[in-house]
């Protein structure tokens, strides 16, 4: 059931104080409503301690007893986790909330309920409008994922922003990380934070060159293509990150800016490090690095790079 249908059901409820079932999502989860608010409720199979946390848009209650539902006589008396959406029914965030809760209900074993709540906090605290450069960066990261799957049969989407907004790298695993830099045009100069790319963690730098042209693809089209790809881009981490990144970009840019990828290269970080070592009193060093004369990894190694990331 989509957000529009759910909101209509809520508006049609006459008795505000009772708890109503709107629709079931799985054997243990569903959308409910009370006092004209939308609730996502999941049976507490994790045996959480009882706690309540409230943010600007969300309220979390874990391990609370629910014994009856107004329009569901057979509703099982049990302990549940409850996520209440505080926003209005015409709020722009409600569609993302409904979509992500639906995905979580089908994959509850992949992300614990409390972790899911904190992922949503990151999503809903972001402002609606963001800078043009976020659209460019997102295009490059999505394009790298698409290339990895279509050309090298490797889905790296679950390695993307593994710590949400606080991720140190764009893609990371226990072995190494990939940092993506997207450039509009054929320039080979990238802006780097030295300690990030050339730190203790082995890193591969992916440089994505694109052009902005009317015949290119919009972000909304690229996201749709990835979502309709069979057997890939289906994880909860990817879904949350897509929703989060979309909110960093204006709606107009997300739908109307059009890009086309013209070239991408991978560089092993330790082969392009311009400094042997940094003085101990230097930190947070950022600079523009010209890669015109740097040797990228051969295309024949790309498959092993992407495979190593997910293993």
Image: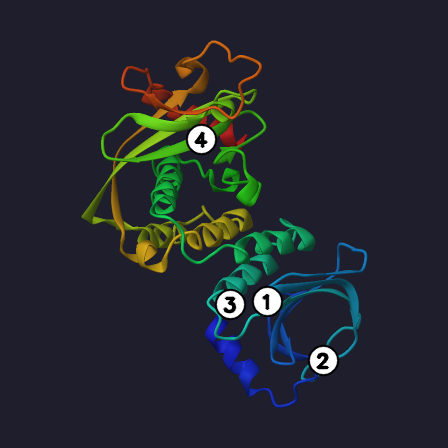
Decide: marks 1, 3 in contact (CB < 8 A)?
Answer: no
**Which of the marked residues, 2 or 4, is nearer the chain's N terminus?**
2
Q: Which residue carries the number 1 mark?
A: 25
245 relative to 210, above or below: below
Q: In percent of the image, x 51 and y 67: which residue is there?
A: 94
Q: Residue furthest top?
A: 276
**Which of the marked residues, 4 or 3, is nearer the chain's N terminus?**
3
- Which element is circle 2 on? loop
Residue 118's spot in the image, x, y percent? 63, 52
**Which of the marked residues, 1 or 3, is nearer the chain's N terminus?**
1
Q: Dot 1: few (<14), some (14–19), or many (≥20) neighbours within 10 Å?
A: some
* Mark seen at residue 179: 4
What's the distance in space between the residues labelled 4 and 3, CA to CA? 32 Å
- Which element is circle 1 on? loop
Q: Quadrant of residue 103?
A: bottom right
Q: Which residue carries the number 3 mark?
A: 94
Q: In percent of the image, x 54 and y 74: which residue is there?
A: 88
* Mark seen at residue 83: none
Q: Quadrant of residue 268?
A: top left
What's the distance in space between the residues labelled 3 and 2, CA to CA? 23 Å
**Which of the marked residues, 1 or 4, is nearer the chain's N terminus?**
1
What's the distance in space between the residues labelled 2 and 1, CA to CA? 16 Å
**Which of the marked residues, 2 or 1, is nearer the chain's N terminus?**
1
Q: In percent of the image, x 56 and y 52: which residue is there?
A: 122
């Amino acid at each position: 059931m989509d957000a529009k249908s759910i909101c209509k059901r809520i508006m049609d409820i006459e008795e505000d104080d009772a708890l109503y079932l709107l629709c079931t999502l799985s054997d243990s989860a569903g959308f409910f409503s009370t006092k004209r608010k939308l609730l996502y409720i999941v049976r507490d199979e994790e045996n959480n301690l009882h706690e309540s946390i409230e943010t600007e848009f969300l309220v979390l209650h874990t391990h609370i007893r629910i014994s009856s539902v107004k329009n569901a006589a057979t509703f099982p008396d049990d302990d549940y986790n409850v996520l209440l959406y505080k926003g209005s029914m015409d709020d722009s965030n409600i569609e993302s909330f409904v979509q992500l809760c639906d995905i979580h209900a089908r994959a509850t074993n992949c992300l614990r309920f409390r972790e899911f709540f904190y992922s949503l906090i990151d999503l809903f605290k972001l402002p609606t409008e963001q800078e043009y450069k976020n659209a460019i960066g997102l295009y490059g990261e999505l394009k790298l994922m698409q290339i990895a799957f279509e050309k090298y049969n490797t889905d790296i989407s679950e390695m993307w922003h593994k710590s949400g907004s606080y991720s140190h790298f764009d893609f990371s695993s226990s072995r190494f990380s990939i940092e993506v830099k997207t450039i509009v045009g054929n320039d080979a100069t990238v802006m780097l934070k030295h300690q990030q790319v050339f730190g203790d963690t082995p890193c591969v730098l992916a440089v994505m060159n694109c052009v902005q042209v009317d015949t290119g693809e919009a972000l909304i089209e690229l996201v749709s293509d990835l979502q309709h790809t069979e057997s890939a881009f289906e994880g909860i981490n990817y879904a949350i990150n897509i929703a989060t990144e979309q909110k960093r970009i204006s709606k107009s840019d997300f739908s109307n800016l059009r890009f086309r990828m013209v070239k991408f290269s991978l560089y092993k970080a330790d082969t392009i490090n311009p400094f042997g070592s940094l003085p101990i009193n230097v930190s947070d060093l950022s600079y523009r690095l010209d890669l015109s004369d740097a040797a990228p990894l051969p295309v024949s190694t790309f498959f092993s790079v992407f495979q190593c990331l997910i293993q």
